Image (cartoon, rainbow, N blue to C red):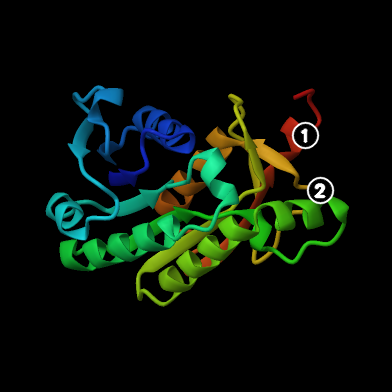
Amino acid sequence: MRLFVIGASGRTGHEILDLARRRGHQVTAYVRSPRKLKAGGWLTVVEGSPLRPGKMAEALPGHDAVLSAIGPPTREAFRPSTLLTDCARATIEAMRAGGVGRLGIVSAAVLFPEKGLYFAFFKWLLRHHAQDLRAMEELVRASGLAWTIARPPRLTKSADEGFRALDGALPPGSTAMSYRSVAAFLLDSVEQRLHIETVVGLGRGVESEMRPS
């Protein structure tokens, strides 16, 4: 497949690139800072802002799917922002103009109506981020694209690729998982045409939960 990755220089984006290379895909990384990545062979690096649909649309024709792993810097997640909403709007516009219909995009489990003190605390802490995520998802749902929205819990650095996926809900006991597992889910979804027009809750794979983290 030819994949177009937005946010490729971030933590989830790096894992998408690595797994896509291992699976034999051709990838275009659309990034603000191309110096962070090395082009060649399987990887084309295009410099551009995720807020500029025109520049994005120029690079999109011929791709099979877009994977978006845009996320705010940690400190920005606690402040009011429309970054994700604005990026989603630009992505949708560019995909329509570029003739690409498949989108996999990362959201967050904070939008699920989970109960308990743990989730209540994070809902309060990330209330501004959640507002931006919710608006982003509304745009994606109304886009007319073949979309998949991934809602993972707290993300950690790990080589683990396993995950559990549940349509419309967070898998029981899901409190953390690896960036790499989210990347594996997104790639599986576009490769196998799974979870189309579906919000998917993610969790750490059963086997990985049995091992010390």
**Label 2 belongs to which residue?**
173
**Up-down relation of residue 143 to residue 10 (above or below):** below
Q: Are marks 1 and 2 in contact (CB under 8 Å)?
A: yes
The residue depicted at 43 percent of the width and 57 percent of the height is 84
Disc 2: CA contacts within 10 A as few (<14), some (14-19) or many (>=20): few
Rendered image quadrant of residue 112: bottom right
- Mark closest to the chain's N terminus, 1 or 2: 2
Q: Quadrant of the C terminus?
A: top right
Give coordinates of residue 91: x percent, y percent.
30, 60
Give coordinates of residue 181: x percent, y percent.
57, 38
What's the CA distance linking mark 1 and mark 2?
10 Å
Give coordinates of residue 15: x percent, y percent.
46, 32
The residue depicted at 21 percent of the width and 34 percent of the height is 45
Q: Which mark is residue 209?
A: 1
Residue 173 vs residue 58: left or right? right
SS state under label 2: loop
User: Foreground residue, 25 or 175?
Assistant: 175
Q: Amino acid at mark 2?
A: Gly
Q: Amino acid at mark 1?
A: Glu
Give coordinates of residue 16: x percent, y percent.
42, 36
The residue depicted at 87 percent of the width and 57 percent of the height is 116
